[in-house]
């Protein structure tokens, strides 16, 4: 069978996702289940993978999805839902709104700084929905609120939900987490410095003139996000990279914004938290403070603790065919465990009742069930495609067609995966091994090439139909999807071209 036909057949599970989501309008979880079934059928009929091996490959993917990915997802969203139950999230919103009355800086604080924090802590749409809802409630135009939050959320996505997209990608292709996170941070850095300026020009409504008086604050908001992110990525890994970056950016932006007098043309009346005390503020932030402390305290920065906890793990081989991977399950020192513990302790500090805990957990499981099915299905698809040889055939065709120019198109694969699924994690699972195989075949730095998948994710996330639907649902704009897509598409198109330039010239310099 020729390579072109194998390439098309190998892409069928992914093409099915596009068809099911964009044409048939199926929910993501149904489309993902269909993709897994199609991959299994093709693996057995075309690539001649025995049924037992196909089933065990899918099982390996499902097991990897359930622990640690699903645990982190449930824990992160449970923490947020519990904070909503206790009223802590309203306190946090009020604190942010009380900093300034300048509409431009409010957008910077809420969409960029707080949105980045929510992406790092919870992800999965919360970092778009919550800031967009806050901005709309303050009086901003609903479509504008969605637009700036989509732009802000794009490039932090590889480190969403305590670094799950990058950690999962690193585990899938066998690369070291900290170095991959650092390379991705380098690739995303120019865009994370530029996006705040784009947001401020939109917020002011006067193009470059909108930056008058806030250019330095905007620059520092980006710089103080990127530099801590690079440092944390290098020393700790993906888990806390965006969380620390967002916290540093928020702190610096707040300090600088409080010293800035608001010009009359940008003045905005906002409802602030009037009865705020230090005790109330600390209680509101307590779960997030605990997550930060526990994840940092059990990371490789505290080697004795990290090494001792590493013993509580298991290594198993699930795949029954040739050359099975050994997958490790870390039972204690995994982000999901520490986030759950932080949520429970933080909830008690916030005086949450037993009913608050129960209802928040039940609501979280119901809310995230489609996402759980999607994650299990996508990982099963990825493993079947990898073990059967589909991924290898896709990579071989891409390499043959593009050759040394492969890195121009590498971000496009990441963008496509995220555009279709709405998830940086799913994009990495679908195309991560393709990128790894291409890097090996072309003798390129695997960290750089695999990292480009996540660079493309940054664009795909802001254009994804799922992201657009989530944003609009938070501002009561359901049904205005095409209007919002037309607004964000020009920015996404330009950014995607720029990611190609970064990918190509970066590979030449390495």
Image (cartoon, rainbow, N blue to C red):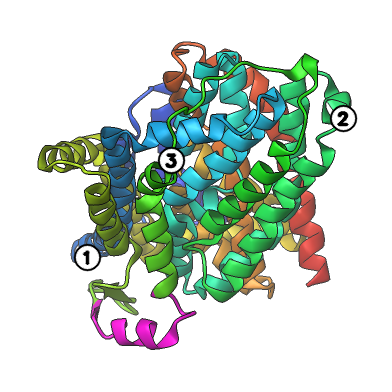
**Closer to the camera: disc 3 or disc 1?**
3
Work out whether residue 387 or residue 246 is closer to the camera in this orientation and state it: 246
**Spatial CA span between label 3 and label 1:** 55 Å
Pointer 2: residues within 10 angstroms few (<14), some, or many (20+)? few
Q: Which residues are magenta?
A: 298-316
Work out whether residue 345 or residue 310 is closer to the camera in this orientation and state it: 345
Asked if residue 307 lies in the magenta stretch, the reply is yes
Mark 1 lies on residue: 56
Percent position (x, y) of residue 509?
83, 69
Pointer 3: residues within 10 angstroms few (<14), some, or many (20+)? few
Asked if residue 139 lies in the magenta stretch, the reply is no
Do labels 3 and 1 touch, CB within 8 Å? no
Q: Earlier in the sequence, mark 2 or mark 3?
A: 2
Mark 2 lies on residue: 212
Q: Earlier in the sequence, mark 3 or mark 1?
A: 1
Residue at (77%, 36%) from the top-left corner? 197
Q: Secondary structure at mark 1?
A: helix
Q: Earlier in the sequence, mark 1 or mark 2?
A: 1
Q: Secondary structure at mark 2?
A: loop
**Spatial CA span between label 2 and label 3:** 34 Å
- In the displayed structure, would residue 48 be above or below residue 116? below
Work out whether residue 393 or residue 227 is closer to the camera in this orientation and state it: 227
Residue at (57%, 46%) from the top-left corner? 457
- In the displayed structure, would residue 456 be above or below residue 62? above
């Amino acid at each position: 069978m020729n390579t072109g036909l194998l390439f098309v057949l190998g892409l069928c599970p992914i093409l099915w996702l596009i068809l099911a989501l964009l044409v048939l309008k199926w929910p993501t979880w149904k489309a993902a289940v269909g993709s897994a079934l199609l991959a299994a059928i093709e693996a057995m009929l075309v690539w001649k993978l025995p049924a037992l091996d196909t089933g065990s490959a899918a099982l390996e993917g499902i097991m990897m999805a359930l622990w640690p990915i699903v645990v982190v997802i449930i824990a992160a969203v449970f923490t947020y839902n519990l904070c909503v139950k206790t009223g802590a999230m309203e306190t946090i919103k009020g604190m942010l709104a009380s900093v300034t009355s300048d509409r431009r800086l409010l957008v910077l604080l809420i969409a960029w700084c707080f949105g980045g924090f929510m992406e790092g802590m919870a992800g999965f749409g919360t970092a778009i929905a919550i800031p967009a809802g806050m901005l709309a409630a303050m009086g901003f135009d609903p479509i504008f609120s969605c637009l700036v939050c989509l732009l802000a959320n794009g490039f932090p996505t590889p480190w969403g939900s305590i670094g799950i997209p990058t950690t999962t990608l690193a585990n899938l292709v066998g690369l070291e987490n900290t170095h991959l996170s650092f390379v991705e941070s380098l690739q995303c850095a120019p865009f994370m410095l530029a996006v705040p300026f784009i947001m401020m020009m939109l917020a002011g409504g006067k193009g470059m003139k909108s930056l008058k008086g806030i250019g330095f604050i905007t620059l520092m908001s980006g710089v103080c996000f990127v530099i801590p992110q690079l440092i944390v990525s290098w020393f700790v890994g993906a888990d806390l990279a965006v969380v620390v970056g967002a916290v540093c950016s928020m702190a610096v932006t707040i300090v600088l914004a409080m010293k800035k007098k608001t010009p009359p043309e940008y003045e905005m009346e906002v409802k602030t938290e009037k009865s705020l005390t230090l005790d109330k503020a600390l209680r509101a932030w307590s779960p997030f403070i605990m997550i930060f402390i526990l994840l940092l305290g059990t990371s490789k920065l505290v080697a004795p603790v990290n090494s001792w906890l590493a013993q509580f793990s298991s290594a198993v081989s699930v795949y029954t065919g040739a050359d099975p991977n050994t997958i490790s399950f870390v039972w204690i020192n995994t982000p999901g465990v520490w986030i759950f513990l932080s949520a429970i302790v933080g909830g008690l500090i916030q005086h949450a009742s037993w009913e608050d805990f129960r209802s928040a957990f039940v609501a979280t499981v119901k809310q995230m069930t489609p996402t759980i099915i999607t994650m299990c299905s996508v990982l099963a698809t990825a493993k079947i495609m990898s073990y059967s040889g589909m991924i290898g055939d896709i990579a071989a065709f891409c390499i043959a067609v593009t050759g040394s120019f492969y890195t121009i198109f590498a971000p496009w694969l990441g963008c496509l995966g995220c555009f279709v699924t709405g998830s940086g994690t799913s994009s990495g699972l679908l195309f991560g091994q393709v990128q790894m195989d291409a890097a090996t075949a072309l003798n390129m730095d695997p960290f750089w090439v695999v990292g480009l998948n996540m660079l493309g994710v940054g664009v795909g996330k802001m254009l994804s139909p799922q992201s657009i639907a989530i944003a609009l649902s938070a501002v009561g704009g359901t049904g205005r999807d095409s209007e919002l897509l037309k607004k964000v598409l020009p920015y996404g198109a330009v950014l995607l071209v720029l990611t190609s330039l970064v990918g190509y010239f970066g590979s030449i310099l390495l």
